[in-house]
Amino acid sequence: MPAGLLGGSFDPPHLGHLALGEAARRQLGLARVRLLPAGDPWRKAARGVTPAAERLAMTRRAAAGNPAFEVDAREVGRAGPSYTVDTLRELRDEGETDLVLILGSDALADLPAWREPEAIVALARLAVAARAGEPVEAPAGARVTVVTMPPLAISSTLVRERVRAGEPVDDLLPAAVAAHVRERGLYR
């Protein structure tokens, strides 16, 4: 069965991430969805990110409510920047032959700037959640399936901004993640 892969900085993981993973799982018949928090998200180096151990703990809490979700900590344990292509190659070498990389349309648009985008589209099919009214433009050679889901105006940036402003985030995060953010005093 195909394996779904949903990666990112997960700083923090929010309800939009979970909705995308579940929509892709149902629509593509995925047995499971692996959440892959980036250890050192090179595309976010300029703004800085929460330590990988915190993001991994939050991702585990976020996934705990769905038995089809599992957290894969390989990128957190890897030294140096986290590159999707390295993870895809590792999974292929471990015998995973049907990989589905789950992306938002914003990530798809940024894919040409990723490390070895041609190898990424050769190693995995892409499942892309399109924003309402926006066409999905696939890179050359990519096998793309559009995932339909209700539009959710949630981003990790919005969560961090609301926490800094002292505003509630319980409507944006799984309860266990919101509790972790409060307990650890993150994003203040």
Image: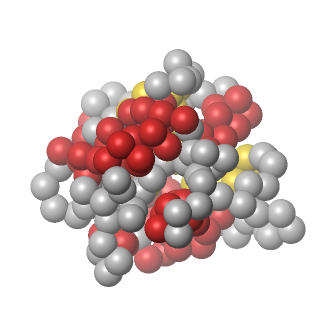
x, y percentage for residue 78?
A: 17, 49
- Assign the N terminus to one quadrant of the image: top right
Please name whichever residue, 23 or 165, is drawn nearer the observer in this view of the structure: 165
Q: Residue at x 32, y 39 (%)?
A: 57
x, y percentage for residue 75?
A: 26, 48
Spot the residue most to the top: 67
Asked if residue 36 can be seen in this view, the reply is no
x, y percentage for residue 102?
A: 56, 48
Q: Residue at x 64, y 34 (%)?
A: 22
**Way the structure is coloured:** secondary structure
Q: Quadrant of residue 120?
A: bottom left
Q: Residue at x 66, y 47 (%)?
A: 171
Please name whichever residue, 84 or 155, is drawn nearer the observer in this view of the structure: 155
Spot the residue most to the front: 166
181 up-or-down from 99: above or below: below
68 up-or-down from 182: above or below: above
- Assign the C terminus to one quadrant of the image: bottom left
149 up-or-down from 120: above or below: above
Asked if residue 166 can be seen in this view, the reply is yes
Please name whichever residue, 76 or 172, is drawn nearer the observer in this view of the structure: 172
Spot the residue most to the right: 133
114 up-or-down from 172: above or below: below
**Number of numbered discs visible in the structure rendering:** 0
Q: Quadrant of residue 162?
A: bottom right
Q: Residue at x 45, y 53 (%)?
A: 12
Spot the residue most to the left: 79
x, y percentage for residue 122?
A: 47, 54
Q: Quadrant of residue 47?
A: bottom left
